[in-house]
Amino acid sequence: MAARAVAAKALAGDVAKGAVDAKAAVVQRADGRVEVKLPAEPPVPPVGGGQAAAAAGPAALVVGVIKRRFKAPTPPSHLTDHGKALWKNLYERFGPKIIDSVTHGIADDAVKTEASLGHLDKIATNLESKDWAKLYPEHPERWLDNDDKVRAVLRDIFVANTKPGRPLSNPKFDRQVLLKDLAEISELKGCSTSLGSLTSSQNQIRGNVAEITAAAADKRAGKTVEDINITAKVTLKDGTVVRGEFDLISDGTVWQIKVGGLPASKAEEAAKLAVWTEKAIALARSQGKTKVGYRFDKESMARYDSDEFQKLLADIRKKNPDITFTSEKIDAPSFIP
């Protein structure tokens, strides 16, 4: 009973601070552990466009691992009833900083605000519903299976990285567009890797944004997008097993996506691109595909167009007549240096 008394005292303090609903109750479980039971909340109506309803929140939290929920103020009055319910639910799960960030510049527009909230809800719902134990059985640190983990990642991206001097601080950065694109790809296995890359404080995340943009655009165009940010072991033609990284598999094509200038000599870049191409061919064949592609912006297209790489590619084509090679010029994100 001592544990229950301590938990009850802690609960009273949390209620006073507004951190826990006043209707919460402390109960002793059969196994001797203490739980704080929160009152059930009404479910949030499904978001338009087929998105899933937001989770109603935990029914009980075990003392010692209590997940502090935020107490939402009155929702903005200009939102619809559905929008108010969604705003309240997401506020309580992810807090004011994330809500303020994803509605930055559009908070007075009910339609845009509710659309952004819907995207946030879709991201969280898709992430938390994945079978992470199956996807990454040996890497539980990669599991985004609850609100706390999702909140931490979203906070790093939309709060920390939008501060002055950080990669997403440029006024040209449209955070609602990125949020929409993330929602579009949130059911893909590699989405967690994409999210992780966006938490970096380095400006190199421009390439990661380009990958997300390309994947989302393909999905909206009706193309079959299989995954993003793929790491896989492949077997080359000589039998060597190597590890490869592939930016996107979409429309039956294994893609590399690059933005920015050449960090090394053309000869060195050509050699790296040729090595990647051999790996991409191996991955494509292992999956019954016949296409390898390159999506580069104007600056990085120098990698593909260089005489050095074209000579290597000509030799690769001769050795792999069953593979089709394609290149597309893309626009690099302009809001990141």
Image (tube, helix red, strand yellow):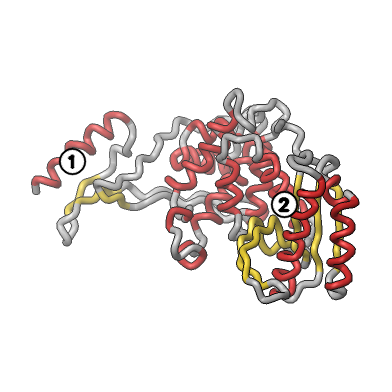
Three-letter residue code for mark 1: Ala
Q: Quadrant of residue 282?
A: bottom right
The residue that label 2 is drawn on is: 216
The residue that label 1 is drawn on is: 8
Depth check: give the residue in front, 29 or 270.
270
**Residue at position x 80%, y 72% in the image:** 290
Q: Position of residue 206 (x, y in %)?
A: 69, 40
For residue 89, say whether it is visible. no
Q: Position of residue 259 (x, y in %)?
A: 76, 43
Q: Residue furthest left?
A: 1
Q: Position of residue 51 (x, y in %)?
A: 61, 54
Are the residues tagged 1 and 2 within 8 Å (C-beta)?
no
Which class describes the residues within 10 Å of circle 1: few (<14), some (14-19), or many (20+)?
some
Query: Is 49 displayed left or right of 126 in the figure?
Result: right
Query: Is 30 displayed left or right of 306 in the figure?
Result: left
Q: Which mark is residue 124?
A: none
